[in-house]
Amino acid sequence: MTTLASHDLEHVIANTPDIWGHLRSRRLFVTGGTGFFGVWLMESLLRANDELALGLSVVVLSRHPAAFKRKAPHIALHPAVTLHGGDIRSFEFPKGAFSHVIHFAANSRTKHVARNPQVMIPTIVDGTARVLEFAANAGVEKYLLASSGGVYGRIPSGVRFVTETLGSEVDPMDTLSDPSGGKRAAELMSMIAANQHGFDATIARCFAFVGPHLPLDGAFAIGNFIRETLNGDPIHITGDGSPRRSYMYAADLAIWLLTILVKGQSARPYNVGSEHDVSIYDTAVEVRRIVNPASDIIVDKQRVEGAPIQSYVPSTERARTELGLRELVPLAGAIERTAAWHQANCGV
């Protein structure tokens, strides 16, 4: 794992000027530190710590600290970072007080989850319970849970933008919704613990993203499209290409997560993502245009005329009006930066 581009980290710092004073000389506990969200958060924190002399201390939970050091030595060996070994469900509590807990572990949108929801749900729920017990024990002030837009279930036909108050249409018998059911439970558990123990619990309901470190061989269509074009392969769309998605660049994601951690209202979820929606097919066209115009696009299924178009796009009005957040990097720039980073650093 190589470091993120300097201009991306500077982008995060430049657009969070009122955040860093709140984190000066603070002690943070982070789970999921080597995942997509975790790497962006950690590198942003460490760059700000070095440039602004914040005096931060960050303890990162890792199931395999030695593997963490091999994978991300620029994070693991930073003097502000301490690795704490343990399983998310049963780790021993690190000693001393902490000001903030950032809970990113147990990503619910991976191929592993689709194959093993019966494994992932207890991991999400039991892991969150353990992290919340630690937060209460450590006397934290603020706690951030990275949840998912999947908590809304199947988006009703005709809804273009999902608001935080949308009623859920979750079918409890649909096993594909199970991991998101774990996230819903984690949200509820977080709110209960915050009320009981007197800390602020903020919720980031995260949608779809693109950027360096995004898996290019997983459950993310745009990542697969970038991999295919970089390899000179045809872009493969498994459906009819009509569903609409939106993609926020990871540097903007880091800005939003840091802002919600520091300024978000407790027990009030915030959607995180882009409102600039685009069909899966048009996403493939844009990736091809930017990365490799010679690529073909193969669409598996024919669009059924008149069939409802499925949408998974957040309304971000709450984050915009209450926290002053906005999307800064457009989709074209996000695709270009992601492809260039992977090509330069991952041999794709």
Image (cartoon, rainbow, N blue to C red):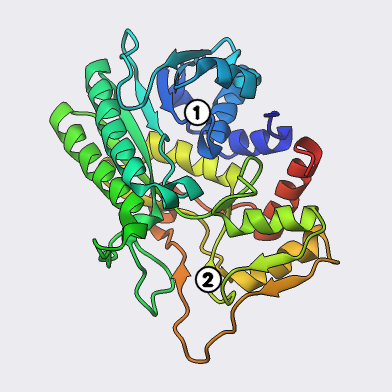
Q: Residues within 10 Å of mark 1 (few under 14, many from 20)?
A: many
Asked if the residue at tag 1 contacts the one at tag 2, i.e. Cβ–Cβ closer than 8 Å, the answer is no
Quarter location, residue 3 = top right
Q: Position of residue 347 (x, y in %)?
A: 79, 39
Inspect the image, locate mark 2, and give the three-letter code of the amino acid beneath it: Arg
Tell me which residue sits at (40%, 38%) in the image.
Answer: 106
Classify 119 as above or below 309. above
- Mark 2 or mark 1: which comes first in sequence? 1
**Side of 345 relative to 143 (left or right):** right
Q: Position of residue 68 (x, y in %)?
A: 56, 21
- The image quadrant where one finds the N terminus is top right
Q: Farthest bottom residue?
A: 305
Which structural element holds mark 2?
A: strand
Which structural element holds mark 1?
A: loop
Tell me which residue sits at (24%, 61%) in the image.
Answer: 172
Inspect the image, locate mark 1, and give the three-letter code of the amino acid beneath it: Gly
Confirm whether residue 173 shows in the render.
yes
Q: Residues within 10 Å of mark 2 (few under 14, many from 20)?
A: some
- Number of labels in the image equals 2
Confirm whether residue 72 shows in the render.
no
Name the disc covering residue 15, or none. Answer: none
Q: Which residue is mark 2?
A: 244
Q: CA distance from mark 2 to mark 1?
A: 30 Å
**Side of 317 relative to 128 (left or right):** right
Classify 294 as above or below 4. below
Q: Position of residue 103 (x, y in %)?
A: 38, 33
Q: Which residue is mark 1?
A: 33
- The image quadrant where one finds the C terminus is top right
Quarter location, residue 301 = bottom right
Q: Position of residue 191 (x, y in %)?
A: 21, 40
Classify 298 as above or below 5. below
